[in-house]
Image (cartoon, rainbow, N blue to C red):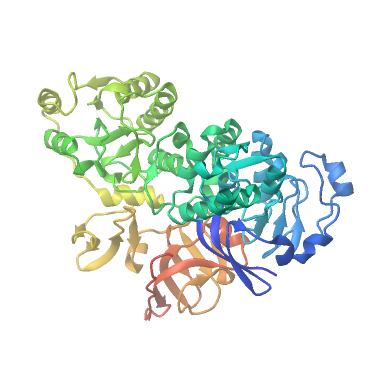
Amino acid sequence: MPRIDIRQRDGLARAGTAEVNGKRFPFPAIADMERLFPALAGLSSTNVPLAADAEFVASFHSPMGPPCVAIHPLACGHATHGDCVVVANWHTALPRPADFVRWLTAMKAVVPPDTLWYAPAAGLPSTAHLLAYAGFDLFDTVAVDLATARGLFCTPEGEVPDTGSGEEICGCRGCSTGDLQLHNRYALERELALVRHRLRAGQLRELVEARCRLHPVQVAILRLLDGEYLFMEPFTPVARSGPLLATTGEALRRPEVRRFEERVVERYLPPRTDVAVLLPCSAKKPYSASRSHQRFRAAIRDRAHELVVTSPLGLVPRDLERVYPAAHYDVPVTGYWDWEELAVISEIIARFLARHPYRRVLAHLDGGALEAARMAAEATGITLEVTASTPPASPDALRDLDAALEGEKAIRTDPVRGTLSWQFGVEVNTRGLQVRGRPPARRVVRGRVPLFSLDDGTGLLRPTFDGWDLIPQGYRVEIDDFLPRGDIMVPGVLEADPRIREGDDVLVMGPRAFATGRAAMGAEEMRRSARGIAVRVRRIMSRDGEPVGHTVHPPAE
């Protein structure tokens, strides 16, 4: 049975190593499937069309296996932990975006996460990125060899007739020797290496958005996958290691973007005030580091709740400006917002203002951001006070903003309360809490008791054991009766809060010990897997209050 070690996750995509019959190899990658899995040669009654009805599938489909188990959207309950699942005919799903997503979600919902996924004859340099994003791990050379037989030259942008000028385009050994098959195989191998690299860097999504532009059906698949938010979001980490590049319209519907928006509307608790001011975003992140926002803050002087209007995130409260992805996204700045952006952003603003009715809402905006605010005001029936008749950062506009807030009382900003509400969905009494230290060693204390440390990379708070006392429920992982000495492995997990996502801080609770750490996978994967690291532990404490130790982790490879 294959031994699977998943090291990086990015939505449905995974990167890691697999060991089969003593042979280790990375994935996603090309694999010699017949040598690794001789049982493939014995699979029969597996070539059932994906669109076949339930009666046909029940009559003719045979799963065979293990370790290779053939699955079908209507017959995928036979796969178990460590299997290599084979999805025959998946290349026929690529031209059918709606079916691709419907079939994929049906299978992923049933098949255990700790399995290898193989799509025979589907991998091309032009499809590998999307297949990996959809969770396929293993590929063969059948598709590129068929392209060779048809005289097609394979590139990541598509397959084109071979004109013998490949050396000008590629320069690989196959091109230099006129060997089309060697080039096509090399092109697929190189694309999968790029997929692994981008996956490790937390930027596979950016690669997929870039690659799919020349293939309308791939754009459709990506958009339809994003439309399955409730399915995709649990697999999406709370933060990535790389920047979020919002350079296409698809960025508006990315799972992590929608999650940020939903938490701002549904979880986030703003400061106690009845005056809000809507501000434009800035190219520099966090916003308060930009010159324009320093001028805004000098004019406002804490007399209103500051809310930044931006695409694709919608609305970023000042106290969440360091939380991923608010301090980690980049967009092309033109001042022009298309109608889709206006519709999405205005809806977010409207939902927030409806949930938190302010006595006054000032719009210190121009361009598309002002238009989105006006649309939201019209939808909610509020009166919008526009304070920027000239560019918002100009001296005249700043004087108008200052004058508009004349007589308003200063409010007490509380970034700890705001961040904890967004992060854990709880209201925490932060009276007496202080933020001390300088980056990267800032912490939240009450007196001399440390409660939270601040992760400067993500803007999130990491509770100590005393800090968890302020969070009475949620984000708990229950373990069996053992004393942890390091990371928590999946077999030791009994239950996990369904809200846990990869990267979330969690409290581990067992009959013999507590531990604090960071989830290495989401709750759904903890429940449905048989192996792997569930929680990377920072501190362990026995039930009698004695510290057991802590684990220091090297940077991810």
Q: Position of residue 315 (x, y in %)?
A: 34, 35
Q: Would residue 245 be visible to someone looking at this image? A: yes
Q: Would residue 78 be visible to someone looking at this image? A: no
Of 72 and 387, the residue lying toward us: 72
Question: Which residue lies most toward the right here?
Answer: 59
- Find residue 530 and report its image quarter: bottom right
Residue pictured at 45% horizontal, 76% vertical: 486
424, above or below 250, in the image: below
Residue pictured at 20% horizontal, 34% vertical: 304
Of 199 and 316, the residue lying toward us: 199
Instruction: Say left or right for 545 vs 51.
Output: left
Of 286 and 539, the residue lying toward us: 286
Instruction: Say left or right for 277 vs 76.
Output: left
Figure quadrant of the C terminus: bottom left
Q: Position of residue 218 (x, y in %)?
A: 58, 36
Q: Position of residue 123 (x, y in %)?
A: 64, 48
- Find residue 84 and report its image quarter: bottom right
Count of number-bearing discs: 0
508, above or below 379, in the image: below
Q: Position of residue 381 (x, y in %)?
A: 36, 19
Instruction: Say left or right for 147 vs 264.
Output: right
Of 236 and 353, the residue lying toward us: 236
Residue pictured at 25% horizontal, 31% vertical: 279
Figure quadrant of the N terminus: bottom right
